[in-house]
Image: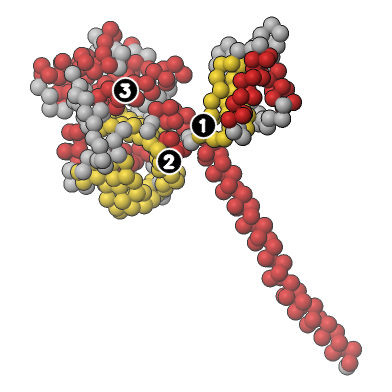
Amino acid sequence: MFRATTFENVTVIATESLSKRFPRVTALDRLSLDIGPGVTGLVGANGAGKSTLIKILLGLSPATEGTAAVLGLDVATSGGAIREQVGYMPEHDALPPDVSATEFVVHMARMSGLPPTAARERTADTLRHVGLYEERYRPIGGYSTGMKQRVKLAQALVHDPKLVLLDEPTNGLDPVGRDEMLGLIRRVFTDFGISVLVTSHLLGELERTCDHVVVIDGGKLLRSSSTSDFTQTTATLAVEVTDSDTHPDGTRAVREALTAAGAKLHARVEDGLPGAGHILLVEATGEETYDLVRDTVADLGIGLVRMEQRRHHIAEVFRTADADAEAAAAGEAAAEAAREPAAVQPVQHAVQHAVQQKGGGRDAG
């Protein structure tokens, strides 16, 4: 069985001014991180430097500059010791098609130093955890994409590591498979105390799964903070109602009634739960807003699915940041344009003056 341990006040991953340069590209640019226990999401577009960072953390690729440590071990000098305590799930498949999941995971457990009996026992436990116990003797070549991803997760966990590095674990999965994989990843820490660093280019995945989110772009750190900081509550109520025979469009009826009562509503709505309507966004000015919504829904005779303070989505934080950056760039361009005529004007005056003087000299002659 897996041990269930947690580490508090421990730095799991630390980098300081970490850089990795190739002849024509800089994959990491002075990246400084301090990651503690839990499930941490590393998000960035393809080519942002996520996979390069993982290779450096595993001691498989040397950094050009800076330092990095995993579980207190220097990646430059203790790569072997790090890999003994860390599991790795690669982005791309490298699975032998003609062996079963049991054979492959047992082999990986033996490669990690487990004796034969312990390797077989740990393999059975791990395959049960990832949901492949019933299919464990089938050749991997006949597995679906989701099953292959689970095999890769199992081999990363089988030697009972303190940390697992998961590179794009939801790649190629349908929405159901993606949700199941994210649930498994969350349980790796909550059930077994194994810290997780998971990479993704999808912000929504990390929002639901991770305790902490690190965002990099072009090898540079954009932001590193807890998920709760990213998704802090707003002064907006999310209100979701059902329809009724009297009000076939319950959302519209509530919107009209709240507007007539003087409440401020956002222009846009969001999708609600299946079978319910959309979500209205109501500005909360105080406790009286809650009372108003409750009484309005009751008077209309429709069902209230939920009424709660809305939280930001991570993607919205970055849309806001992008909009701020664009606004700042536009402001700088406008300021530059405003300065340009001021700089050109004295030159124009000087030219005009010289022309006039020259003309005046001819007239005098």
Residue at horizontal 27%, vertical 16%?
129
Q: In which quarter of the image is residue 53?
A: top left
At label 2, the amino acid type is Val
| Label 1 element class | strand
Q: Quadrant of residue 92?
A: top left
Q: Which of marks 2 and 3 is nearer the N terminus?
A: 3
Q: Residue 311 carries which label?
A: 1
Which of the pair 66/322 is nearer the observer? Answer: 322
Which of the pair 256/216 is nearer the observer? Answer: 256
Q: Which of marks 1 and 2 is nearer the N terminus?
A: 2
Left or right? Give the position of 291 relative to 135.
right
Q: Which mark is residue 238?
A: none
Which of the pair 85/19 is nearer the observer? Answer: 85
Q: What is the number of callouts on the image?
A: 3
Residue at horizontal 62%, vertical 57%?
332
The answer to whether the residues at label 1 and label 2 have Cβ atoms under 8 Å apart is: no
Q: Is 34 located above or below residue 189 in the figure? A: below
User: Can you identify the residue that label 3 sits on?
Assistant: 187
User: Can you identify the residue that label 2 sits on?
Assistant: 215
At label 3, the amino acid type is Arg
2 or 3: mark nearer the eye: 3
Residue 58 in view in this figure = no
Q: Position of residue 163 (x, y in %)?
A: 25, 32
At label 1, the amino acid type is Arg
C-alpha distance separating marks 1 and 2: 19 Å
Residue at horizontal 69%, vertical 6%?
245
C-alpha distance separating marks 3 and 1: 24 Å
Residue at horizontal 56%, vertical 39%?
319
